[in-house]
Amino acid sequence: MRALRTVAISSVLFTLALVASAQAAPVPAAPAAMAPKPAVTWDQFPPAVKATIQKEIGALPIMDKLSKKPDKDGKMEYGAGADVGKKNIKVKVAENGMLIQRREKEDIGPAGVPKLIEKAAKKELGKSPILTAAKLTKDAEVSYQMTAETKDRTLELTLAGDGSFMGKTEAKKKADQTTTTTTTTTPPGGAKK
């Protein structure tokens, strides 16, 4: 009986010591990758960068789509974006104010698809009507992205501005309309742009 009491007391003392040491132990800091990034503000952009962004996007508020990060050579690149009507415009600018890239996505809807593009899309989509359409512009290069549906598939098609094929994604749907499998086709001898 005495041995049993000694074991019980030892057990309680051990548990108390374990709890006390756990409370005294410092909590490790979160890794740097998990720490929140400081917000980038318009005030942090050099005057040459601001001038280029305002020229490309316009004199509108630049909302919350600001970025600032070094490129592969360690030189700072600045990014900004804004929604203007049905357009989403994004620019990337070098520290000296030189425009690196301008991207624009405009929701044009099925009615806004040019006839040449619509004709080329019908070859790929068959009788499936175009449900959504967007005009994409990267620098001076224009392309069109469209979606359509059949009974069992969702189709996404990308065509260049001249109507040439760039890529097609087909996704099979389950009975509950969720996508399960995706296959992508690209033009012979090239990848999607």
Image (tube, rainbow, N blue to C red):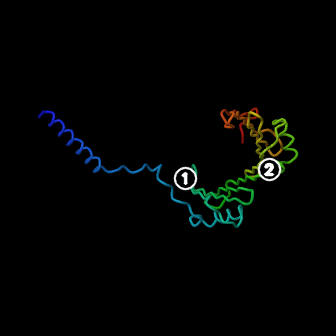
Q: Residue at position x 79%, y 52% from top?
A: 108
Q: Position of residue 130 (x, y in %)?
A: 81, 43
**Mark 1 Cα-neighbour bin, 10 Å: few <14, some 14–19, many ≥20:** few
Q: Quadrant of the C terminus?
A: top right
Instruction: Please determine whether, in this image, residue 166 is positioned above or below residue 74.
Output: above
Q: Quadrant of the N terminus?
A: top left
- Residue indicated by mark 1: 74
Q: Would you say 24 lies left or right of 71 here?
A: left
User: Of tags 1 and 2, which is closer to the observer?
Assistant: 2
Q: Amino acid at mark 2?
A: Gly
- Residue indicated by mark 2: 109
Q: Earlier in the sequence, mark 1 or mark 2?
A: 1
Task: Quadrant for residue 88, please give it.
Answer: bottom right
Instruction: Please determine whether, in this image, residue 158 is positioned above or below residue 3.
Output: below
Q: Residue at position x 43%, y 48% from top?
A: 31
Q: Would you say 9 lies left or right of 165 here?
A: left
**Mark 2 Cα-neighbour bin, 10 Å: few <14, some 14–19, many ≥20:** some
Q: Position of residue 143 (x, y in %)?
A: 77, 46
Task: Quadrant for residue 148, please give it.
Answer: top right
Q: Amino acid at mark 1?
A: Gly
Q: Secondary structure at mark 1?
A: loop
Instruction: Please determine whether, in this image, residue 153 is positioned above or below residue 34.
Output: above
Q: Position of residue 85 (x, y in %)?
A: 74, 60
Q: Residue at position x 76%, y 52% from top?
A: 107
Q: Position of residue 4 (x, y in %)?
A: 16, 33
